[in-house]
Amino acid sequence: MESRKWGIVGGGIMGMTLALRLTQQGHKVVLFEAAPEIGGLVSPWKMGNAEWDKFYHVILLSDFRTRNILKEIGLEETIEWVETKTGFYMNGKLYSMSDTIEFLKFPTLNLFDKFRLGLTIIIASRIKNWKRLEKIPVTTWLKRWSGSRTYRKIWLPLLRAKLGESYQKTSAVFIWATIQRLYGARRSGLKKEMFGFVPGGYKNVIQAFKQKLISEGVEIKTNYAAKEIKTSGNDRKSISFTNEKNEEFDEVIVTLPSPLASRLCSELPKTEIQKLNDIEYLGVICVAVLLDKSISQFYITNITDSNIPFTGIIEMTALVDKKYLEGNALVYLPKYVVASDPLFNQSDEEIKDYFIVNFKKMYPWLSDTNIKFAGVARAKHVITVAKLNYSESLPDVKTSIPGLYIINTSHIKDGTLNVNETVRVAETKLEEILN
C-alpha cells in the first residue's frame, strides 16, 4: 500500500498503537483525542499529593506485546516485578488463597469440591480451541466441571461481581480467557506468577509513548471530539469536530466503543449500524482510596458476599512500593455495571459514601482519619459481554465505506480486557487492513 494520510479517532492505547505502527510503515498519521491529553482508560489523575492511574492496570510476564511497546519507548527495563497474593472475602471473613496449602485449607468447600475446582482451572488452562466454548454458556460449563456446590459458592458470586446479571448470557470463553491470562506466564516456564508496573504508573508510559509518536512524525490533536465522519470527493473521508474544525483523510480508523462509533459513522447502512449497536458493553464505576496504611497483603481480594456493592478490592500497594504514592496505600473499589445502571446517575459523593461505608464493614478498624483521598472514576463502555457465538456476530473492522475502519476492544474475542489484548487487537487488525 502506497503512503496514505490516515486519521485516527480516539487517543487511548488502541489509537496510539495504531498510529505508531502506521507511521512506522511510512504513512502520514493524525491522532485525535477528545480529552485534553491522550491515554484513555490508562490516564492518570491527582490524588492529593500523589498521582497514579485512574483505573487499575498491571503487567504480566506473559504480556509480550505490552512489553514490546515498552521496549520501543525505552521503559521495559524500568518494570518492577513483584510476586503477589490473592485473598477471598467470604461470609464476612478474609481468607488467603495464594498457594496450594491455603487452597487445601480453604473453608466452605470439602476436599472433593476443591479437587473439582482445581481440575476446572487445569482443564481451562489447557484448552486450545476456544471457539467451541463460544457455544456453551459459562454457567453450564462451570457446573459441569466444578459441580453445582462449587459453582454456587465460588463461581457464581465471582461471575456476578465481574459481569452483573449479564453472566447469564455469557459464553464459557469468558472464564477460559480469564484463566488463560493468569496461567500464561507459567506456561512459559515460570514457576510463579509475577505482576509488574512501571514506576510512576501509566502517566510515564503515556508521556514516553507520546514522545515516540511525535518523533516518528505522528501529529497529535487533543481537545478534538469527533462529531461526524462523512465521505467527501475523491473517496476521501471528512471528520467534523465539535470545535467546528474539519479534516480530510484517505483512510480513517475509529477506535471508540461500538455504540459511539455507530453515531459518528451515520452513512453506514442500517444493518452495519445495528450490528455495532447490538454489541453489549459493561461500564465500570471505580472508587480509588488513598490510606495511611495497608489493609492487607493481597493484591486482589475477591468478594463472594452479595451485600458488598463493589466487585473486589485491588490493593495497588501490595504491588507498587508506597514511595511512589507519597508513602500512602492505594486501594481500588471497582463495580462493573451496564451503561444504563442508575448508579451512573448518582453523584460522586453519593457513590463514595456508599462504597466506603461497605469498605469499613469489611475492615472495621478503618476510620475517616485513615482515608487521605477518595475519588470516583467512571466509564460507560469498558468491557464487552462475550455472548454465545460472540465472534460470529462481530462486525468486520472494514466497513462498507472504503477507507473507513472501526477497530476497538469489542474485537477481543478470545481474551479479557487489558492493555496487552488492546495492543494485540490493534496490531493484528491493522495487519488485516494493510494486507
Image: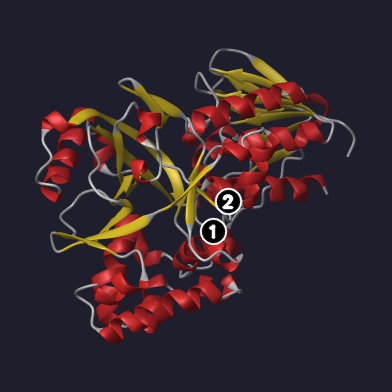
Type of amino acid at the residue the image marks with label 2: Glu
Position of residue 7 measured from the top left corner of the image (x, y, whole percent): 70, 28
Position of residue 208 measured from the top left corner of the image (x, y, whole percent): 62, 27
- Residue receiving disc 1: 415
Q: Is residue 151 visible?
A: yes
Up the image or down, 104 lies above or below 347; here it is below
Type of amino acid at the residue the image marks with label 1: Gly
Label 1–label 2 contact, CB within 8 A = yes
The quadrant in which residue 96 appears is: bottom left
| Crowd rating for badge 1 (residues with CA inside 10 Å; few <14, some 14–19, many 20+) | many
Q: Secondary structure at mark 2?
A: helix
Up the image or down, 238 lies above or below 307; here it is above
Pick out the residue farthest to the bottom. Answer: 112
Q: Nearer the viewer, residue 122 or 338?
A: 122
The quadrant in which residue 347 appears is: top left
Quadrant containing the N terminus is top right
Position of residue 410 measured from the top left corner of the image (x, y, whole percent): 54, 50
Q: Is residue 164 visible?
A: no
Pick out the residue farthest to the top. Answer: 244
Q: Is residue 353 left or right of residue 36?
A: left
Up the image or down, 34 lies above or below 282; here it is above
Q: Nearer the viewer, residue 387 or 70?
A: 70
- Residue receiving disc 2: 421
- In this figure, which colouring scheme has been used for the structure? secondary structure
Q: Nearer the viewer, residue 141 or 397?
A: 141
The dot on residue 157 is none
Q: Nearer the viewer, residue 3 or 301?
A: 301
Question: Residue at left 67%, top 44%?
Answer: 68
Question: Residue at left 50%, top 63%?
Answer: 177
